[in-house]
Amino acid sequence: QVQVEESGGGLVQPGGSLRLSCVVSGKIFRNFGMGWYRQAPGNERELVAVVSDTGPITYGDSVKDRFTISLDTSKNALYLQMNSLRPEDTAVYFCNGDLFSLLQGRKTYWGQGTQVTVSS
């Protein structure tokens, strides 16, 4: 059974930093790419950053120059370094993976989310 699980959320003051991690468990034949999304109360889920296994990265406009996404395909692990955090970054952060397994083929998997709260 393939699963995606996030960790690293928490409470941080404005201007602070956090590093989120996401790990894929289960037997994966190929990882096509992974990404971070977030959802604040009353808002739709929005793109934070996505990275392809071939390299291209896309950031949401509101996090450019503050957040950095990185993918370690050897470990099937995804990271999000968040710097200069703002109260408006408060949300549940979700990890997803575009993954291929022999049992289920190519499929997008979502984690349960990790809460990030930016507040003084």
Image: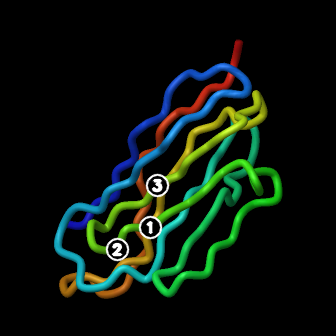
Locate residue 44, reporting x and y percent: 73, 50
Whether residues under marks 1 and 3 lie with C-beta atoms below 8 angstroms apart, the answer is yes
Looking at the image, is 7 positioned above or below residue 34?
Answer: above
For the C terminus, give its image quadrant.
top right
Q: Give the residue at mark 1.
A: 71
User: How many discs mark residues in the rendered view?
Assistant: 3
Neighbor class of circle 1 (other Cα within 10 Å; few <14, some 14-19, many 20+) is many
In depth, the one of 18 and 3 nearer the eye is: 18
Q: Give the residue at mark 2.
A: 73
Q: Give the residue at mark 3.
A: 79
Type of the residue with mark 2: Thr
Q: SS for tag 3?
A: strand
Looking at the image, is 99 positioned above or below residue 77?
Answer: below
Whether residues under marks 2 and 1 lie with C-beta atoms below 8 angstroms apart, the answer is yes
**Residue 102, disc:** none
Give the image's coloring scheme: rainbow
The Cα–Cα distance between marks 2 and 1, rounded to whole angstroms, is 6 Å
Q: Residue at x 56, y 60 (%)?
A: 69
Q: Residue at x 37, y 68 (%)?
A: 72
For the N terminus, give its image quadrant.
bottom left
Q: SS for tag 1?
A: strand
Locate residue 35, reporting x and y percent: 54, 64
Mark positioned earlier in the residue sequence (1 or 3): 1
The Cα–Cα distance between marks 2 and 3, rounded to whole angstroms, is 11 Å
Mark positioned earlier in the residue sequence (2 or 3): 2
Neighbor class of circle 2 (other Cα within 10 Å; few <14, some 14-19, many 20+) is some
The Cα–Cα distance between marks 1 and 3, rounded to whole angstroms, is 6 Å
